[in-house]
Amino acid sequence: MPAGSPSTKTWSSRLTFLFATVGASIGLGNLWRFPYVAGENGGGAFIIVYLAFILLLCVPLIMAELAMGRRGGKSPVMTMGSLCKEGNHHGFWKTIGWLSVISPVCALCFYPVVAGWSMDYIALAVKGAFVSITPGEAKTQFDNLLASPYRLILWYTLYMAATVCVVSLGIRRGIESVTSFMLPTLFIIIILLVIYGHIEGAPAKAWQFMFNPDFSSLTWRSLLMALGQALFSITVGTGALLTYGAYLSRDVSLPGPSWLIAFSDTLAALLAGLAIFPIVFASGLDPAGGPGLMFITLPIALGGLPLGHFFSVVFFVLVFFAAFTSSLAMLEPFVSFMEDKGYKRHKISIASGSIIWFIGLSSLLSFNVIKDFKPLSFIPLYKDKGMFNIIEFSVSNIMLPLTAFLLALFAGWVMSGKLLRGEMGIKNDAAFQVWRFLVRYLAPVGVGCVLVFGLM
């Protein structure tokens, strides 16, 4: 019997489960961070290393996290409590559950701020603000957005309200319905942008940059960046898989969905590169444009191409869709936890969303009104960091890697291998031994490196 009683919240089908989990993994990390990180670290060589980490580290951890979630059958905190009770494990391991609830809540205190930028840029694109825009004008346009608390608060508030509304409707009427529409549409948009980039852009340069590796350009920092990008692009340790796994029926074998989640997330990242880089190269711009690649470099590139007005709108709609499906997975673990405690879903969704919105204002205002407020400058790790960077750094460099590290240790060394194998549905002995080796040894070392070096 499962460690926890079966959840009353279940996916209506295996397909809707895949839509939700893939939607959770495809976010700003794929469309915003992956292209510029690949650009900064040599393109092809970085991508090959990234793919290796997906294969050897992420897929085994996806299987483990989904199996743990389904075995517990409830919110992450309750699931870890049930697993510890079932296996007579030390209560310390409940930390995984708490981190899986707290980390995504903290992420929602900065993530919707960036997602709100995409909404503002949709409006700008509709008005034709990027047509024939110069580099100086593009930078000024982005700086003006960051300097305007009123514009930022408008989009941030609308975004958070939409997130709360969908989560409050529950799994089937809310998350399933939205992700079942947004995810297929997202891939259609990406493919449309890839086709456009290959017609109007410089596809040969993009393919050479992405798939003609120069390993001499790789550094230890590049390897760590690839590992970190692989881990957290695919939502390992964020609480999403632990939560969504609890809603999965017991007749679904987990290796297949795990591979599909990893494949879909990786495909989205690669397609994003094949959409963005041809446009960037055709305009003679720098592919290593840093965080400004999406909001400064791309508007310049699209603004100078035929049909750029239309495709700039399409692109930022894509960014919004990717961010939104991930945000649903960030709020769901906490709402699920409070629902297990007896609270009504719609009430706790509104209450928690309101509190997160209020705390997130400090992130938003750190770009303008309180930009000189550096409350933790006395701590070396947070020197010269405003509220946005404090929260983002804490989540990305401490909380998420720590959760993934503990999860790898628990799955590899603490939880019964026989139980996990049965829950995952791995029938082949050799396949299970490979999985166990990767989770026991490679995953803790790899994630541990991300955690340690991320604090240096």
Image: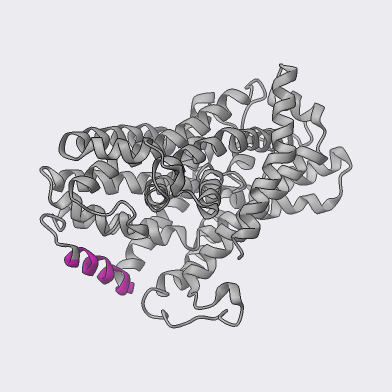
Task: Pick whichever, 84 or 230, lies toward us.
Answer: 230
Q: Nearer the viewer, residue 252 or 54?
A: 54
Q: Residue at x 50, y 45 (%)?
A: 233
Q: Main secondary structure of the magenta part?
A: helix
Is residue 148 magenta-colored? yes
The location of residue 67, given as percent across then percent down, is: 69, 33
Q: How many marks?
A: 0
Magenta range: 136-149
Residue 206 is left or right of residue 301, and the answer is: right
Tell me: residue 11, above or below residue 215.
above
Question: In the displayed structure, would residue 18 be above or below residue 140?
Answer: above
Residue farthest to the top?
A: 428
Name which residue lies at 52% across and 36% down: 21
Regarding residue 216, the answer to whether it shows in the image is: yes
Regarding residue 176, the answer to whether it shows in the image is no
- Residue 5 lies left or right of residue 345; in this view the side is right
**Colour scheme in the image?**
one colour
Residue 118 part of the magenta segment: no
Q: Quarter of the image containing the N terminus?
A: top right
Q: From the top left corner, tell me how far across and down residue 383 is, in percent.
A: 54, 77
Looking at the image, residue 432 lies above or below residue 87 = above
Where residue 216 appears, as percent x and y from the top left, is: 45, 46
x, y percentage for residue 92?
A: 81, 54
The quadrant of the picture occupied by the C terminus is: bottom right
The quadrant in which residue 455 appears is: bottom right
Q: What residue lies at 75% left-to-right and 18% top-to-bottom? A: 429
Name, please, the residue furthest toward the right.
Answer: 88
Occupied quadrant, residue 115: bottom left
